[in-house]
Amino acid sequence: MNGVSILVLGSDFDVRRRWDAKRMTWSDAAESWKLRDGMRRDFEVGQADRTQEFQDATVRLPERFQDFAQIPQAPDVMSYVELRDYIGRLQQAGHQVGKYLVDLYSKIAFPLAAPIMVLVGIPFALQSPRGGRVIGIALCLVLGLGYFVVHSAAVALARTDLLPPIVAAWSANFLFATLGLFLYLRART
């Protein structure tokens, strides 16, 4: 890589050290980065900045060459385990992971929509048809669309940090499972 800047942050996210190099290469043998032709600056509170030029330097970073070589997949394409591991790496690096957590929790919550919608539909199947099958089918389609709208709205709110990720992923399931249980208990057989 050419024209590289590396910022080393402290626990309070202030810059503690900055590396600038014309070139950076990965060394598999040393499992570290080799910097060429650059400058290192150290920043300490209450002290003057220290600057040191270098021809060659070695830096160990949590990021390996593979982290830069791989193009990250979209969360909806990753498996549950891949997404969980990706979130762990992002958290270790100090990134915000809320939008990825929503996708992770949704990978468990969304497949449960089918049995929940069956629970919602059973009371309608137990009732005698007043308007015929067409009304029943239309009502089921409206309920299915309603589930999708509630789930999508909750996920959108979580991605803007207005709702916790786990609440967003499970809110539609909870709402429609409660509705289904209520309708089932009220159904006349």
Image (cartoon, helix red, strand yellow):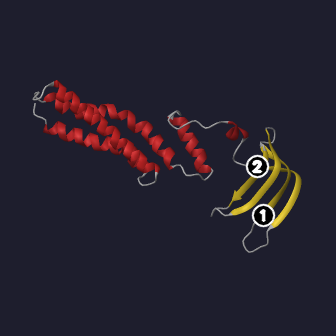
1 or 2: mark nearer the eye:
1
For label 2, the SS is: loop
Q: Residue at x 20, y 30 (%)?
A: 122
Identify the residue shown where x is 34% and y is 34%.
Answer: 113
Give amino acid for label 1: Asp
Give the distance between the C-alpha atoms of the residues marked 1 and 2, in whole angstroms: 16 Å
Q: Residue furthest right?
A: 55
Residue 166 location, x and y as percent? 42, 47
- Identified by mark 2, the residue type is Arg
Which numbered dot is residue 42? Answer: 1
Judged left or right of residue 10, residue 134 is left
- Mark 1, other Cα within 10 Å: few <14 / some 14–19 / many ≥20: some
Judged left or right of residue 64, residue 124 is: left
Judging depth in this view, the residue of 175 and 181 nearest the camera is 175
| Quarter placement of the C terminus | top left
Quarter-wise, where is residue 13 in the image?
bottom right
Is the Cβ of the residue at disc 1 closer than 8 Å to that at disc 2?
A: no
Labels 1 and 2: the sequence-earlier one:
1
In front: 16, or 22?
22
Q: Is residue 71 left or right of residue 184?
A: right
The residue pinned by badge 2 equals 60
Q: Which quarter of the rendered picture does the N terminus lie within?
A: top right
Q: Residue at x 79, y 68 (%)?
A: 49
Q: Nearer the viewer, residue 121 or 181?
A: 121
Q: Measured along the vertical axis of the image, is residue 14 above or below residue 111? A: below
Q: Secondary structure at mark 1?
A: strand
Task: Measuring from the top left, give residue 174's x and y in whole percent.
Answer: 31, 43
Q: Residues within 10 Å of mark 2 (few under 14, many from 20)?
A: few
Residue 46 locus on image (x, y percent) = 74, 75
Task: Give the image location of residue 169, x and y in percent.
Answer: 40, 43
